[in-house]
Amino acid sequence: MLDFLRTFFDLHEILDVLPALLTEGLRNTLLIAALAIVFGVVAGVLLAMLLLSRRRLVRLPARIYVDVFRGLPAIVTVSLVGVGLPAAGLRPFGREPLGYAVLAIALISAAYSAEIFRSGIQAVPAGQLHAARSLGMPYLTAMRVVVVPQGVRNVLPALAGQFIIDVKESALVYLLGLGFGQRELYFIAQERQAATYNSSALVAAGLCYLLLTIPLTYAVNKLDKRMREGRRFTAVPAAVAPAPAKAAV
């Protein structure tokens, strides 16, 4: 039992690695996840619009992208992007591994976000689009002004959940060999564990991930509950409520 506690809960090891985890590691983990979700949201909306097109030639490339990046294990995508692209001579970020790390997680996030947005947009009643078109709006304008904003509101909890996934998947970028100052939580802990043969640093990193993901999980659940209750009990606005009938004179 004593060996178990020393291996996983060595207080000296935890306190020694904690400053690097809370400064460099936490900062870069949040940076990678935040940039990935921003790219994922923007690209996901565009991909969702393509997926909803009535033209097969328009839908097909988006469907292939979504199926490929959702079907590949995240660790394979990170390796292909972070190791494969530079080896092939494609170096949009030069020799900075952090850029490739963000790109890899962002490509995965975009594929999942596209499906999230597609389901949210399809949940909007078709009458909304028909009403906008009857007012003379072009299809793309009606989607951008009327349908997509409602679809985004439907999927806010799911998008928040995707951010939690991006936070956890950022641990895979340790494969790219991030430099000092660019290391995320797992990379720092894994380096410490390899140097000391003690897993307490990994436990400390796990606690940092839990400090991020558990509050976010409860926030997502609370947001989802509020939105469902809001949709269920929203009153009819006075501006569109039917006016009371006037008494006959």
Image (tube, helix red, strand yellow):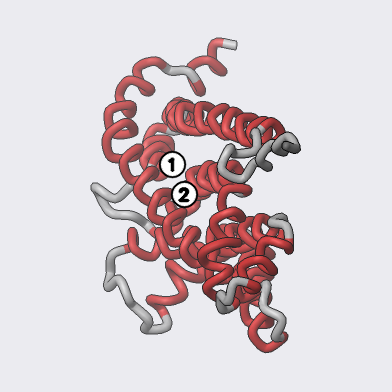
- Looking at the image, which is closer to me, 193 or 75? 75
In the displayed structure image, the side of residue 94 where residue 146 appears, left or right: right
Check residue 42 in the rendering and tell me which mark sits there, or answer none: none
Q: Are marks 2 and 1 in contact (CB under 8 Å)?
A: yes
Residue 198 seen in the figure: no
Q: Residues within 10 Å of mark 1 (few under 14, many from 20)?
A: many
Amino acid type indicated by mark 1: Tyr
Residue that appears at 58% across and 68% down = 143
Q: Residues within 10 Å of mark 2 (few under 14, many from 20)?
A: many
In the displayed structure image, the side of residue 57 where residue 16 appears, left or right: left
Residue 235 on image: x %, y %? 65, 33
Check residue 186 in the rendering and tell me which mark sits there, or answer none: 1
**Extreme residue in the left direction:** 181
Residue to which mark 2 is pinned: 170
Residue 84 on image: x %, y %? 46, 74
Q: Quadrant of the C terminus?
A: top right
Residue 12 on image: x %, y %? 34, 17
- Looking at the image, which is closer to me, 22 or 197? 22
Of labels 2 and 1, earlier in sequence is 2
Up/down of 188 relative to 198, above or below: below
**Extreme residue in the top direction:** 2
Amino acid type indicated by mark 2: Ser
Up/down of 104 relative to 60, above or below: above
